[in-house]
Image: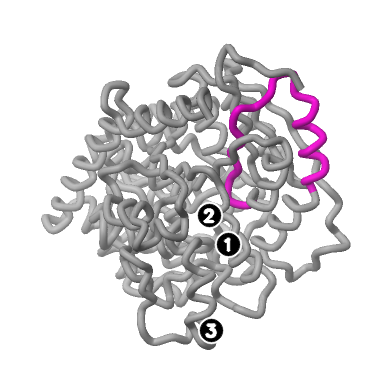
């Protein structure tokens, strides 16, 4: 491995899944365009990576970074049908360590920094072996990082299951966390995914710096706690770099011309966009209630609709073609005809960034994934938070209670079916009711804050990446 002195060389490692891959790709592009890094991205592929491959090709045109795919390891002997997603991802990353180590050793220029995402902490040892500074990239927010590094302490303080507690958990210097808001791995302290999560919380402080997909003015309290040696800074110790908002660029609309022609004819801020992410699905009963709620709201909408899950909320499954015959089989009778003028149903996938950027779109019913939240805030679009899994309950609380850019159901959708009347009221609240004006105004404020963070002069992302570049040049 030769040493390159012309410019810093960052190696980024992405866990499987679009939710991890998208922010890693975008971070890589920013390192290249803002700080003239050479960037190599290693992508640990999943067994079903067709969508990931498509995303890679779209994201890297024109090509800015070198992309190297680590073939998926056979982990069938290590997992079963009931193995949790966090456990599966942790095992996939663990089993890919040897291949990753070998691939890094073949690089022509020596990396000056290695940046690992959420599930990559066990590979810190590769950076240590090569004597390369190691950084941890949090594609989510500062409050999530605070919880993650504090969970090993909570593990010693809390007796019994977290979800059975009656009082919120105090996280030093941050907003406290209610038992119902804990991340998925904390649901069951006897499950392997909990031990994997605690391990990650223990390993993160071993890094030489933390990059977070947020900006200084968005989460000042949590960032201050992470930097305070008497609070969470005493755990993390490494410098904190705010590199958000990380959002995708506008995408080719492809076969969606008809959809955007329709959007072009709608009044400003009049359309609600409904999408529950690449992996979120609803039960049959909840799908029916959502359809009725949208219709009763009497508002225009675009709904990225999927066949209901076989059981529960938040499952991941393969959808069909989504033709009218199929859609009518799980939507209210006559729904397609009644909403023909005001609603557009899109099967499986839609160009979300372009839709949120369109002036006719005035609201977003979202699963509250952090990527989607960043895209919504960056376009000044208020949200209806509909959390399903992972850290999305935390996210929903953050955007509704702390940031003030969202409304949410009275009880999380994972706890019970949200009725059509409540859905109708939430839609009308952010789209037309006077009480929603403050939410829309706040969304506009945060949009301006995001633009400031992204600016070349004085923007927090530019300043943070400048500090990182300088550190890479002069370790």
Task: Give the residue at mark 2.
Answer: 205
Quadrant of residue 173 within the rendered picture: bottom left
| Residue stretch rendered in magenta on the structure | 96-119
Pointer 3 or 1: first along the chain: 3
Residue 105 versus residue 88 in the image, above or below: above
Quadrant of residue 39 within the rendered picture: top right
Q: Position of residue 292 (x, y in %)?
A: 38, 63
Asked if marks 3 and 2 touch (Cβ < 8 Å), the reply is no
Q: Position of residue 69 (x, y in %)?
A: 74, 33
Which structural element holds mark 1? Answer: helix
Which structural element holds mark 3? Answer: loop
| 13 vs 437, nearest the viewer | 13
Q: CA distance from mark 1 to mark 2?
A: 7 Å
| 202 vs 50, nearest the viewer | 202
Task: Give the residue at mark 3.
Answer: 161
Quadrant of residue 428 within the rendered picture: bottom left
Task: Give the residue at mark 1.
Answer: 202
Number of other residues with Cα within 10 Å of mark 2, as a class: few under 14, some 14 to 19, many 20 or more: many
Q: Is residue 172 left or right of residue 321?
A: left
Residue 214 versus residue 411 in the image, above or below: above
Query: Residue at (46%, 32%) from the top-left corner?
Result: 248
Q: CA distance from mark 3 to mark 2?
A: 25 Å
Asked if marks 3 and 1 touch (Cβ < 8 Å), the reply is no
Q: Is residue 75 left or right of residue 452?
A: right
Query: Residue at (76%, 22%) from the top-left corner?
Result: 1
Asked if marks 1 and 2 touch (Cβ < 8 Å), the reply is yes
Res 347 seen here: no
């Amino acid at each position: 491995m030769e040493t390159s002195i012309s410019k810093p060389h960052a190696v980024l490692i992405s866990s499987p899944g679009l939710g991890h891959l998208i922010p890693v790709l975008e971070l890589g592009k920013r390192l290249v365009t803002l700080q003239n890094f050479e960037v190599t991205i290693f992508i640990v592929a999943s067994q079903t990576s067709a969508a990931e491959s498509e995303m890679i090709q779209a994201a890297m045109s024109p090509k800015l970074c070198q992309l190297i795919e680590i073939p998926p390891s056979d982990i069938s002997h290590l997992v079963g049908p009931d193995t949790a997603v966090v456990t599966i991802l942790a095992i996939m990353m663990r089993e890919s360590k040897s291949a990753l180590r070998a691939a890094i050793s073949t690089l022509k220029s020596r990396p000056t920094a290695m940046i690992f995402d959420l599930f990559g902490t066990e590979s810190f040892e590769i950076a240590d072996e090569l004597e390369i500074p190691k950084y941890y990239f949090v594609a989510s927010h500062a409050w999530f990082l605070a919880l993650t590094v504090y969970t090993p302490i909570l593990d010693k303080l809390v007796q019994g299951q977290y979800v059975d507690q009656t009082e919120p958990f105090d996280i030093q210097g941050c907003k406290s966390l209610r038992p119902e808001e804990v991340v998925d791995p904390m649901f069951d302290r006897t499950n392997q995914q909990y031990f994997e999560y605690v391990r990650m919380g223990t390993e993160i402080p071993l890094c030489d710096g933390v990059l977070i997909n947020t900006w200084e003015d968005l989460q000042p309290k949590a960032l201050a706690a992470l930097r305070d040696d008497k609070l969470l800074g005493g755990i993390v110790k490494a410098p904190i770099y705010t590199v958000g908002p990380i959002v995708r660029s506008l995408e080719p609309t492809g076969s969606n011309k008809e959809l955007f022609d329709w959007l072009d004819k709608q009044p400003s801020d009049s359309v609600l966009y409904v999408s529950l992410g690449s992996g979120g699905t609803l039960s049959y009963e909840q799908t029916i209630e959502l359809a009725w709620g949208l219709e009763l709201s009497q508002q225009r909408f675009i709904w990225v609709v999927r066949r209901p899950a076989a059981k529960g909320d938040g499952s991941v499954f393969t959808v069909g073609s989504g033709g009218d015959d199929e859609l009518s089989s799980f939507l209210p009778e006559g729904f397609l005809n009644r909403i023909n003028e005001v609603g557009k149903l899109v099967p499986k996938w839609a160009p979300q960034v372009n839709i949120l950027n369109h002036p006719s779109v005035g609201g977003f019913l979202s699963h509250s994934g952090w990527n989607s939240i960043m895209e919504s805030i960056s376009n000044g679009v208020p949200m209806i938070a509909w959390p399903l899994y992972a850290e999305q309950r935390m996210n929903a609380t953050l955007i509704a209670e702390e940031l003030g850019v969202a409304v949410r159901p009275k009880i999380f959708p994972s706890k019970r079916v949200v009725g059509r009347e409540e859905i109708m009221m939430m839609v009308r609240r952010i789209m037309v009711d006077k009480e929603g004006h403050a939410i829309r105004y706040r969304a506009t404020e945060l949009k301006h804050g995001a633009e400031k963070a992204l600016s070349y002069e004085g923007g927090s992302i530019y300043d943070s990446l400048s500090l990182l570049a300088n550190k890479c040049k002069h370790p």
